Amino acid sequence: MIKYKIRELIQQHPLHNGRKVTLTYLAENVGVQSSAMSKIANNKGYNTSVSTIEALCKFFNCNVEDVMEYVPDE
């Protein structure tokens, strides 16, 4: 399973341009709907595009492995 680490990134980077990073703020800046960002952040089996992953990397100035990781099924 792919696990997204959005909440961890928000905790590590709580401010962006002086504003608190919320899922809504993040969605607006990444270019996806708030509901999609919520599904990604809550790891509800949501499949997202490479362009969204790229936008998240750009927003947080990080690498792909900082945004998501593979977790083997138990």
Image (cartoon, rainbow, N blue to C red):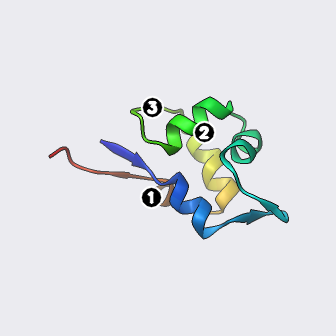
- Dot 1 alpha-carbon crowd within 10 angstroms: few under 14, some 14 to 19, many 20 or more: few
Quadrant of the rendered image containing residue 15: bottom right
The residues tagged by marks 3 and 1 sit, at their Cα atoms, a distance apart of: 17 Å
Q: What mark, if any, has residue 22 been given in the picture?
A: none
Locate residue 32 relative to residue 72 in the image: left or right: right
Q: Which SS class for mark 2?
A: helix
Against 63, is 1 above or below?
A: above
Name which residue lies at 70% across and 47% down.
26
Type of amino acid at the residue the image marks with label 1: Glu
Q: Position of residue 66 (x, y in %)?
A: 49, 60
Query: Residue beneath label 1, please?
Result: 65
Q: Earlier in the sequence, mark 2 or mark 3?
A: 3
Q: What mark, if any, has residue 46 been given in the picture?
A: 3
Q: Which SS class for mark 3?
A: loop
Q: Position of residue 1 (x, y in %)?
A: 29, 41
Residue 63 seen anywhere in this rendered image of the structure? no
Q: Position of residue 64 (x, y in %)?
A: 50, 55
Type of amino acid at the residue the image marks with label 3: Tyr
Name which residue lies at 72% across and 36% down.
31
Quick one: which residue is furthest to the bottom in this view? 12
Q: What mark, if any, has residue 52 been given in the picture?
A: 2
Q: Earlier in the sequence, mark 2 or mark 1?
A: 2
The residues tagged by marks 2 and 1 sit, at their Cα atoms, a distance apart of: 14 Å
Type of amino acid at the residue the image marks with label 2: Thr
Q: Earlier in the sequence, mark 3 or mark 1?
A: 3
Against 61, is 31 above or below?
A: above
Q: Which SS class for mark 1?
A: helix
